[in-house]
Image (cartoon, helix red, strand yellow):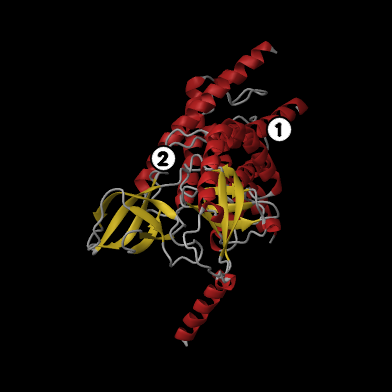
Amino acid sequence: MTNTIIRNIIRFFVLVLVQVLIIKNIELGRFINPFVYVLFIIVLPFETPKWLLLFTAFFLGITIDMFYDTAGMHAAACVLMAYFRPGILKLFSPRDGYEFGTQPTIQYLGIPWFISYAGILIVLHHFILFYLEIFRLQEFFSTFFRVLISSIFTLLLVVISQYLFQRKKEQE
Amino acid sequence: MRNLVVFIAKNYFFFLFLLLEALCIYLLVQNNKFQRASFINSSNQVSATVLSTSENIQQYFYLKSENERLAKENAELHSHDLLSFSVLTDGWFAVNDTIYRQKYVYTNAKAVNNSTNLRNNFITLDRGYKQGIKKNMAVISSAGVVGHTQDVSENFCTVMSVLNSKTTINAKFKKDGSFGPLNWDGVSYEFATLNDIPTHVKMVKGDTIVTSQNSTMFPENIMVGTVESYYREEAKPFFAVKVKLSTDFKKLTHVYIVENKLKQEQDELEKKSEEGNKE
């Protein structure tokens, strides 16, 4: 239990630093802004209390906001994402429910499950984020394009990072 | 009352969500309308320290090209120095210094955080109010305009760069002085759009665009960019000009913050006239 908490706290800091020091400086073209830090919310354990889910999401968003100079924008997107997480987990739950002690990762539930689960959450997060950033309907379609392309890249990076974590676990 | 408490306790997840979301929106709106929320930006100490450490490391990789650029600039400044002019007249002449008054004061600064791929881009500089920086000072680089200062903390300030939907710079054609507002359309970090140029203005690709005398922030004739292409605005007697920005925002490191010593006086006078007009 304590192990899980410590691991999640470390993951929080690593993801924030990776996002603001590395990903923020990588330019993949104007339409592509991956936000890998959302991985933190995606892989929180199933047993996380709902209120804790919202608060950690809010705190994560505010931390990212500090570095991106976007007061409240990332926080709003993260909180919304965290709000929908339990519902989406329920939607995709296996017939017998989730096994105790497992985590919503590729390792436990496989690629197709993870992509559909993480994909929906990521698109949701990016959708809110990009429309809050633009805050008008003038550039609706170009923003929508940005949402899709960025989501695909985020998902790609999230899946890749999952494989990195997985290998580490087998060694333990 | 009891029922209400039970109802809220039962659906606490939803209400907590609403509460946090409202808090986010509040921060966001406040940030747009008034001062940007003072602690959630990159001029705050924690994030600024992390960013400036990372910037310090990154800078080593650019030292060479940066040195070359500075040396070039030094050489150019030396050529403007009085010592490098030889006196052509033999007769005596007097210089009355009191006819000159310093209007612009330059402070050099280093960018410690920069973005170009968002819709609203900001730059963080390592100068703050301890170094005499205030809100709404112009920021330029040796290549051209960069933006203007937004929030100022003790040792850092954030700059709303040209690459921001809320930045408007008053720019003009160097050759005939026709001016208009320059905005960024968010498509490429290399180009911005200059609007409201009358259709009688003759222009060719490569014409120079500089800051106009109408801006209280920027000194006149600071390079903005060159004409890339232009088209007529729909149903308006104006051209919209696509301008290739002379500043390379991707390589921005050393910039100058410009203080206009007479800005306050001018602003106050103009405000007074406007108010007088209303009555």
Front position in the image: B194 or B71: B71
Same chain shared by disc 2 and disc 1: yes
- In the displayed orientation, state which residue is furthest to the top: A171
Q: Position of residue B117 (x, y in %)?
A: 47, 41
Say whether residue A159 is visible: yes
Residue at the spot of label 2: A146
Say whether residue A50 is visible: no
Q: Position of residue B241 (x, y in %)?
A: 31, 54
Determine which quarter of the picture holds residue B58.
top right
Residue placed at 38% from the left, 45% from the top?
Answer: B187
Q: Position of residue B10 (x, y in %)?
A: 65, 48
Front position in the image: A69 or B63: B63
Residue at the spot of label 1: A9
Chain on which label 1 sits: A
Helix or strand or loop: what does disc 1 sit on?
Answer: helix
Chain on which label 2 sits: A
Q: What numbered label is drawn on residue B242?
A: none
Q: Position of residue B171 (x, y in %)?
A: 39, 60
User: Is residue A67 left or right of B172 when viewed as pictured?
Assistant: right
Q: Where the C terminus of chain A falls, by quadrant?
A: top right
Q: Where the N terminus of chain A falls, by quadrant?
A: top right
Determine which quarter of the picture holds residue A30.
top left
- In the displayed orientation, state which residue is furthest to the bottom: B279
What amino acid type should be assigned to the residue bearing mark 1? Ile
Tell me which label, 2 or 1, sits earlier in the chain: 1
Residues at marks 2 and 1, CA–CA distance in whole angstroms: 30 Å
What amino acid type should be assigned to the residue bearing mark 2? Arg
Residue placed at 63% from the left, 22% from the top?
Answer: A99
Q: Nearer the viewer, mark 2 or mark 1?
A: 2
